Structure formats: C-alpha cells, structure tokens
Amino acid sequence: MELYVSLALLSALMSALLAYQIYRLDHSRQYASFIPVMFSTGVWSLFSGIWLLMPSSYVLATVKASYIGVITLPVFLFLFALDFAGSSWLPRVRKKVWLLWIIPGLSLLAMVTNSLHGFFWQEIRLDRVLADVEVYDYVPGPWFFVHSIYSYGLVIAAAVILFKAVRMQKSLISHYALLAGIAAPMIASIIYVAGLSLLDYSPLILTLAIITFALTISHRFYQENITEIRAMQEKTSELNRLYHKVVYVSGRLIQAEPGQIDMAIEEVLGTLGLATHVDRSYVFLYDAEHDEVSNTHEWCREGIPSEKDNLQHIPFSEAVPRWRHVLMGGDHIYIPVVRELPDDEIYVDERAILEPQGIQSLVVVPMFSGKHFVGFAGFDSVHNVRSWDEESIALLKLAASIIAGSLDRVGYEKALIRARDEAEDANRVKTEFLANMSHELRTPLNAIMGFTESVAEELSPGEHREQLGIAIRSSESLLQLINDLLDFSKAEAGVLTLTPQKIELFQLLDFVKDTFLPGAKEKGLDLQVYASPQARKTFILDEARLRQVLFNLVGNAVKFTHKGHVKVFADATPLNGKVPCRSKKHPDMANRTEKQEEAGNDDTASGPLTTSLPDEGVSGKGPLDGAGHEGEKQFDGFIPHRLIITVEDTGIGIRKEDQGTIFKEFVQLSSGDNRQYDGTGLGLNIAQRLVSLMNGDIRVQSQPGEGSRFVITLNQVPGAAD
C-alpha cells in the first residue's frame, strides 16, 4: 500500500516537472498541446495516491478529484495526437472543439451530482479494509459506460494517429513501443473497472508511457533546435567579441591626442574590420557647404586595394542620392548581395560605384555630431558575401558615433589650444608692456619726487611748502601703484623671485612700526609691535619681500581702522628636522597662484577676534625653495622654524562672503564705507603670492564692525638654534 502511494505521488511529481521542462524549453510552443496531457495525468496520479491517505469522510471527494484527470485526459490526448501528427483535421477540430467536451462535461456533472441520481455510480460500498485503509467498490452506472466508451474511443483514435506519425518520423522509441505505452494503461484501466484489481494502476503505467513519450518530444525538440541553439551561441559570442572591440575603440579614441587622432581612427577601423570579418572599413566625412563626401580614413585587409584616393569630393546628392536620404535620416544602408541589387533606376548609381570595387556585401552607418550629420562609416566584404544582424549593426552605429564624437573633441581641443596660445601671447605682450612701462614711468617719477623734496626742504613753512607736500604724497602713491603693477606683472610672468639672506626679524618689525607710527598717531590709534623670545633671533628670509607683505597688511590695518589699535605679533616655533639647503628656481608662479586662489575659501575663517594663534601642522618645503638662484648653501647653526606673524586691528572688518575674494587681483570691497578708500586691489594679491612663494599662507578672521586679524604662517624657515 505504501509503495502504491509513493509511486502515485512520484508519478504526479514527474508529470509536473516534465510539463514545466517542456514549457521552459519549447519557446516556440511547438508542443504546447502536450502540457495538458501531462497535467491530466498528474491530477489522476496525485489523487489516486492521496485518497489512500485520507480519512473515510474525504475518500469520495478525493476519488472524484482524481476523475477530473480521468475524464479530461482522453480529449487532451486526442488533440495532442492531431497536433503532433500535423493532421489536416486539426484546424477544423479546433473550430468545433467544444463538441469534444460535451460528453466529458456531462460526465463531470454526473459524477459531482451522483448522490442525487446514481447515473455515474449506481452504488458505492465498502469492499474491504487493507492495512487500516477502507477500499470501496464503485458499481458503474449507465453514464459511466457512456463515459468509458467515449474515453476509450478517443484514446484508441489518438493511439492510431500517433502510431502513424511516429512510424513516419525518426524517434528514440519505435511505433510499437508507443503502441505498448498507450495500450498498457488502457488494459490496466479495464482490469480496474471490471473489478479484477483493488487498486487502479493505470495512472502509474500511463505516467511511465508519458515519460517515455516526453523523451521522444525532447529528442525531437533538441534535434530541431540544436542548430538554432548553436547559431545563437555563435551569434552571442560574436556580438560579445564585437562589443568588447567597441569598448576598446572608445578607450583608444578617448586617449588619443589631437595630433594622433587620424592614426587612432585608422587603427580602430582595422580593429573593427578584423572583428567583423570584412575586407575594407572606412570613414567618409561630409562637407555641408559643397554637399560632398570624401574618404578620409581607411583600413584594408592584406591583398585588398585601397580606394581612398579614388573617393574624394564625391557629390553626395548626385552620386548616391538614396544613401544621402537614408543616412541623413539616421538609418543605415545594408546591401546583402551587391550583384542582386534591383535593376531599378535608383540603384544604377550605386552599382556603378560598388561593382568596380569588387564589393559583394556592405553595411554603412551614419555619423552624427548632436543632430548634425557629419559623415558615415562603411564596412565592405570583397571576398565573400557577408550577412549582418540588427544587433551587430547597432554596435557599428555606436562605434561610428564614438568616432564622430572623437573628431568633435579633437576639433574643440584644437580650438582651445589655439585660443590658449593666443591668450598666452596676448598676456605675455601685456606683461612685457606693463613691466616696460613701469620702469619707464618710475624713472622720471623718482626724479620728480627727488627735486620736489629738495625744493620743499628749502622753503619755509607756508602754503607753497604744503602744496609741495601734497605733490610728494601723491607721487609716493603713484610710485606705489607702479610698484604694485610691476610686481603683479612679474607674478603673472612667473619671474617673481626671492633673495634669502640673514635678517633680524625684530628689527624688521621695528622698522615697520616706525614707518606707520606717524600715520597711526595722526588717527589716534595705538600701534603695537611685539616679537616673542623665539622670534628675536636671526632667520634666513627675503627681507625686502617680507617687508613688502607687512607694509601691505599693516598699511591696510591703519587705513581701515579709525579708533582702537593695530597690533603686530611675531612668534617662532623650532621644528625637528634639517634645514633645507638646496635652492632652485621656483616653478611657474602663475600656476601656484591659481592653486592658491582656488583654495581661497579654505584659507579664510571668521569668528570672534582673539589673541590666540592658530595651531597648525607644518608641511611642505622651506622658504629657500624657489629662491630664484642655483647652487647650495650650508647654514651651520640653523634649524627649521615655523614662523607666525599676526596683524590685528579694530577696524571696519570684512563680511564673511567677501573674505574669499579679497586676495584676488583688482578686487576692492564695494559695500559700506569701503568705497571711500583708494587702492588698486593688487596689494593683498601680491602679498599672498609672495607668502606662497615663501612656502606659507595668509589667513583672515574678521567680523564687520569688530576688526580683522591676518595670520601669516611660514613653514620650514631656517632660524638660529637656541
């Protein structure tokens, strides 16, 4: 009993799996009519085994469920036989298939309502008990015999049809085996219906027959599709190779320099030509002004003559009007066999061009720059006829678009290079002009200032001496403007240099104080200068350039402060390490300045004013790098220091949004009362360039109405050891 249940459930499972397998493999649904056969067989087998496991109250319902498979199977088998054999009766049967379902439908109805009339089973009685399982005897009713005769008739008809079909076709099983596979379950069913067997073995035997027949279908399916599958595999592999070649083409053209683009295009044409097994690949560029196309790039397989020289300045509209219309519309030209082109007038010009070249097949794809047609790429097969699929042509279109984009990119890059060269030439001329003019202006101005000062010293105090004083101060302002322009022009030209030497920092600070003290006192400001003990030592620095930076910062502080104080504080911190002793020419100062300006927002900070100094790490080279001279100097007794100089004031302050722009050239604050202060807008920019040249930076902290604090940090400054 357990064995029967296991076999029944296994038969149902096998039917389901085979139905799914055929559905999954048969993409064309050639054997779709076999799936219902397996479904009915599975239902029959499943419930034939389940009823032995059910309680007595559910046995009848389970038996009726199994008869769903019994009643529907003959119809499905008959329809499948017609389909499998390709019978001419199949279309007519399908049109009136409902006739086949009249008796099965009435059989299902009679079975479900049997308790009301007893037409299907006259009596259902307990026959015996096997292993605690109650086995019932179903006494056939009149409609049961109608159902049986109809079902056996359909099965026999299906067997005959399949027998003939299998006999005419090559298969894994013979037509006799097929006949036995259908006859065996029929005999088992007759034995069960006649009451000669307690259990119905027909679904199990039928499942074996179905499995055998499923193998036949699978074999037939694989026989019919194996060539197609292999072709699809080869096509997929070919597309995959072509895809990787297109990816390579993209990378190669992206990396190509403007001067190498022609060589790169011919190289990728060769790559694509070999990958697609053609004999010639080429690019034609379109001249919209003259409506001409010219063969600009070409690759030919060995032994294939070049046609490049023969295909120049071809009138597009006259030579191949069909190509012009199709390609400009974004479509491609595909000619499978050139010699089979129609004799229509529209193809005459094409044949006149293609046949002399010995071309048998070709495909041509358009090239666009945005929405503008720029040319086309073609692939000719000379030795053999070559067929193309849509997927391969789509990849060739992509490759052509990449080539067009590369030509565009190179055109833009060449235009940018020309514009850059022109801008550099103009900038160099401007810089040379400013430098020359600065020298030309400064020489007579110095003479004017000298004579004016001499005359002023000889005059007694009065209106004339006061007017000469105004002239002297104006001359000094003009001289400062000229000096700023000269330094700016040097910085732009990359020739701003340093001359390091031993200096006493505190003496430099005292000089700065003495210079600006009269002006500070005149405004009632408290000007203080302080150097920490570590800063009161000898350092190796460019004194003139550091003085220029301090003059700018302290001068601005005095200018923009009306009450309160201006403080200058210097501190130095010894660092571990050796003093850099090799000095060399500094790289292009313009490049360093641009980088510094890009980081301008990072070099600023805002917040309440304090007297604390920033505690930052030290990195980078020393101030001797970029000193503007070559050679080596040994600085015995010197060690590297981090030097911090702070200029703090209680002036008008700077808004946060303006702090990132004050170091840019020709920038002056335009808000509030700042417009009343004169200046060129070059001082802070030059100061920043000089500090950057000394391997340092300037940072600003400021609040409007509270004042500003500028912090200069110089790294790796050689200073005397303690």
Image (cartoon, grey):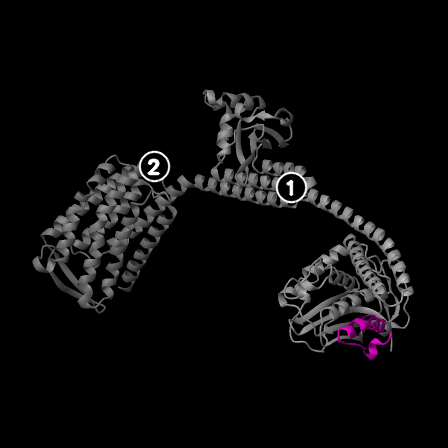
Q: Amino acid at mark 2?
A: Gln
The question of residue 524 being in magenta is answered with: yes
Q: Nearer the viewer, residue 602 or 246?
A: 602
Residue tagged 1: 410
- How far apart, in angstroms, are the residues tagged by discs 2 and 1? 65 Å
Q: Tell me where residue 52 appears, x and y as whole percent.
A: 23, 64
Q: Nearer the viewer, residue 583 or 110?
A: 583
Residue tagged 2: 169
Magenta stretch mostly in which secondary structure? Answer: helix
- Which quadrant would residue 169 be assigned to in this image? top left
| Left or right position of 281 against 331 | right
Mark 2 or mark 1, earlier in chain: 2
Q: Amino acid at mark 1?
A: Val
Which one is closest to the eye, mark 2 or mark 1?
A: 1
**Compared with residue 589, is residue 238 higher up or lower down, i.e. above or below?**
above
Give the residues drawn in magenta, as a range: 508-537
**Compared with residue 309, is residue 158 higher up or lower down, i.e. above or below?**
below
The question of residue 279 being in magenta is answered with: no
